[in-house]
Amino acid sequence: MTDPLAEFDTALNALARDHLIRRRPVVESVDGAHLRVDGEAVLAFCTNDYLGLSRHPALVDAATRGAALYGVGAGASPLVSGHSAAHEALEAELAAFVGMPRALFFGSGYVANVGLVPALVGRGDAVFSDALNHACLIDGVRLSRADAHVYPHNDVETLATLLAASTARRKLVVTDAVFSMDGDIAPIAEILRLCERHDAWLMVDDAHGFGVLGPDGRGTAAHLGVRSPRLVYMATLGKAAGSAGAFVAGPAPVVEWLMQRARSYIFATATPAMVAEALRAAVRVIRDEGWRRDHLARLIAHLRAGTAALPWDHPPSTTAIQPLLIGGNAEALAAMQALRARGLWVPAIRPPTVPDGTARLRVSLSAAHSEADVARLVAALHDVAG
Ligand SMILES: *Cc1c(COP(=O)(O)O)cnc(C)c1O
């Protein structure tokens, strides 16, 4: 008789050998960027809470009032009885905020993307995907069964060639707006021009731009001033918006189609209305508290000035995502551990999240940080880099 668990033990041992085992630190309390983790105080540079909204009193109050009104569970899918007045209002407010005709609220960004791509394209269609797109876009592309063409990162020329050569009935380009592990911004205006020329659709995933970029934090499309009936805009709400969820916005018939056909929308219990209420408050705070974006911009400049002399490559990024490229998995992990020993939490990002040989420290900054927090990080990075 063979041991039924042996194959998993072998596979886990192989991960450990390649320094690819992940563990989950247990966060015991949160005070802005200052956390208690596994019994120790740490200053965190690892969250996507870019504006520091996850504990904002206006969001917490709105969630509490939402819970009193609607309870803590939606009870059913939105197409049955889970769609509350809070969800309805949130969708209208999100659409108005990003300047698009209609929006549809999803439980998370992952869930949104694996539903959206297959609702937009299917067998016989073609989808064109940036090589550095987020995993959930890649999964959405796979689920769609459309012919997938991966183009090199931000390579508009190759994309133009691929689009020109395609004879597919429907064509869809998908790209992160701000790339999650590099912090750079996709050339959306150029891509959109190509889409218009080749009758293709463009879906952008603005997980890291919504709330941070653009006038009043309206996102990367607003930041770049792009508008088109061919643009389908998706953003997550668990990052700068400080809570959880995601939405897609676009032309009314497209959004209606997504509501009718995105399986991850139809076959999932609606997000609790209390979350929708917290997010309605988040949209107001994002719009009204511009000082959070101004402060974040100062922190980004401060960090970049401080890392210029480090031995690691610090690719240009104007966003809150600031990668320091180290290369090897073991070296990136050692740097993370050395920072952790100094009370700082900066995650080491390794393959398969990033390409082989590009393991990195991913510093993410937040309006919850102070100038002193960033100065402490810069000093520790110099110390660790030796
Ligand atoms: C985080 C992220 C997602 C997933 O969003 P969740 O709400 O966390 O599920 C999707 N796309 C990108 C680019 C992301 O960074």
Image (spheres, grey):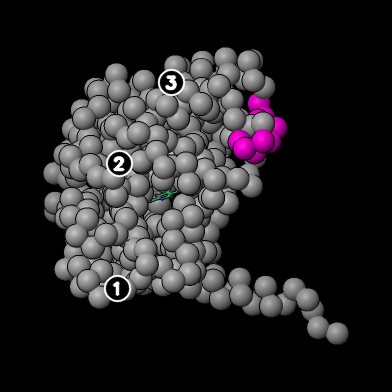
Magenta stretch holds residue 69: no
**Residue tagged 2:** 209
**Label 1 vs 2, first from the N-terminus:** 1
**Label 2 vs 3, first from the N-terminus:** 2
| Residue located 66% across and 26% down the image | 72
**Label 1 vs 3, first from the N-terminus:** 1
Magenta stretch holds residue 74: yes
Q: Secondary structure at mark 3?
A: helix
| Residue located 48% across and 73% down the image | 18
User: In the displayed image of the protein, which residue is found farthest to the bottom?
Assistant: 1
What's the amino acid at mark 2? Gly
Q: Residues within 10 Å of mark 3 (few under 14, many from 20)?
A: many
| Residue located 61% across and 71% down the image | 12
**Residue 368 in picture, x, y percent from top left:** 34, 29
Q: In which quadrant will I find the N terminus?
A: bottom right
Q: CA distance from mark 1 to mark 2?
A: 30 Å
What's the amino acid at mark 3? Ala
Question: Could you say which is closer to the camera, residue 354 or residue 12?
Answer: 354
Residue 281 is tagged as: 3
Q: Left or right: 293 with respect to 169?
A: left
Q: Secondary structure at mark 2?
A: loop
Is the Cβ of the residue at disc 1 closer than 8 Å to that at disc 3?
no
